Image: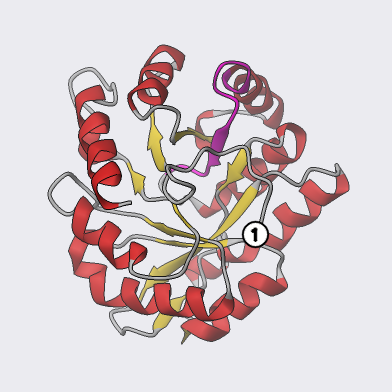
Amino acid sequence: MLDTKIKFYNGRVALNVLAKDLENALAVYEAAEGHAVVGLLSKKYNTVEEGVKEVQEYLGKLGVVSVGLGAGDPSQFEKAALIAAQTDPGHVNQVFTGAGYAAGALKANRFSRTYINVLMSPTGQPGKVKINTGELSSKAADAAVDIDTAVAMLKDMRAHSVKFFPMEGLKGAAELKEVVKASERAGLELIEPTGGIDLENFEEIMKICLDSSIPRIMPHIYGSIIDKGTGLTRIEDVKKMYGIIKKLV
C-alpha cells in the first residue's frame, strides 16, 4: 500500500474538496480534522512554475495537496503531471491517457508518496467505461471498454485509482457499483467517485464504496458545497460530510 501523506479517517476515507484560498483551505482541513485533501487546479496557472510555487505554499501549511486538472480538462494533463513531479503533493488527477506520463515523471524524481488517479467516465452501461478522456482522444469517437480491462490498463500505467467522473450523483450509482467491484477484483487500494455529489446523496454513494474491501475511498465534492456568492467552500457543509463519514466508518 502506498506510503501516502493523506490522512484517511480510520484509515479508510478522506474528502477531496476545493477551496477559494489558503485561509479557506486551512478551515476545511481543520473542519475535517485533517482528513481532507484540498485541490489546486492546473487550469488556473499560466505555467508549471506558477503552479509549483502555489502548491509548495499550500504543502507548507497542509502537508498534502491534490493537483487537479480543472473540471477534468484534458488539456491540463501535462501541466498537472509536471507540477506533481516537482512537488510530490500526495495526489494528482489524470486523464486516462496521461496517467503513465505522470507516473514516469514522478518516478524520474524518485517521488513515491503521490496517488495518481485515472479519469474514466460513465457510458450508461454498467460494466463499461469511457476511456478516451485524453486531450485528443476526448474529441474522437467514444471508446467504451469493459471495466476490468480498463482497470488492468490503469495498473499497467502504474496508476492507483479510478476517478469515476462525471457521475451526476446517484444517476451513476449502478455504474459506480461495477467500477467498485472491478477495482476490488483488481486489488486497487483507492476509489474516487466524482461529480454531482452533495449532502443529500453523499451517504448513499459512500455506502456503495464502503461495501467493498477497497482500503481507501476519496469522494470528490466540489460545487455543491461552494457558496456561489463568496466562492468559499462552506465549512459547515464539510463538517456535515465529515460527520457522515464518522458515522459510517
| Any part of residue 142 in sight | no
Q: Is residue 148 above or below residue 220?
A: below
Question: Taking 195 as reference, is 41 left or right?
Answer: right
Q: Is residue 156 above or below residue 57?
A: below
Question: Taking 178 as reference, is 205 left or right?
Answer: left
Tell me where residue 102 appears, x and y as whole percent.
71, 52
- Please name the amino acid that badge 1 sits on: Gly
Tell me where residue 52 appears, x and y as whole percent.
68, 26
| Any part of residue 69 in sight | yes
Residue located beneath label 1 in the image: 98
Question: Taking 201 as reference, is 126 left or right?
Answer: right
Tell me where the magenta segment starts and ends, as one range.
58-70
Tell me where residue 47 appears, x and y as whole percent.
66, 29
Q: Which residue is at a point 24% across and 51% down the rendered structure image?
A: 197
Q: Which residue is at a point 85% across and 44% down the rendered structure image?
A: 110
Q: Which residue is at a point 24% across and 46% down the rendered structure image?
A: 247
Q: How many numbered marks are there? A: 1
**Residue 36 is drawn in which quadrant?**
top left
Secondary element type, mark 1: helix
Q: Which residue is at a point 56% across and 76% down the rendered structure image?
A: 151
**Residue 210 is drawn in which quadrant?**
bottom left
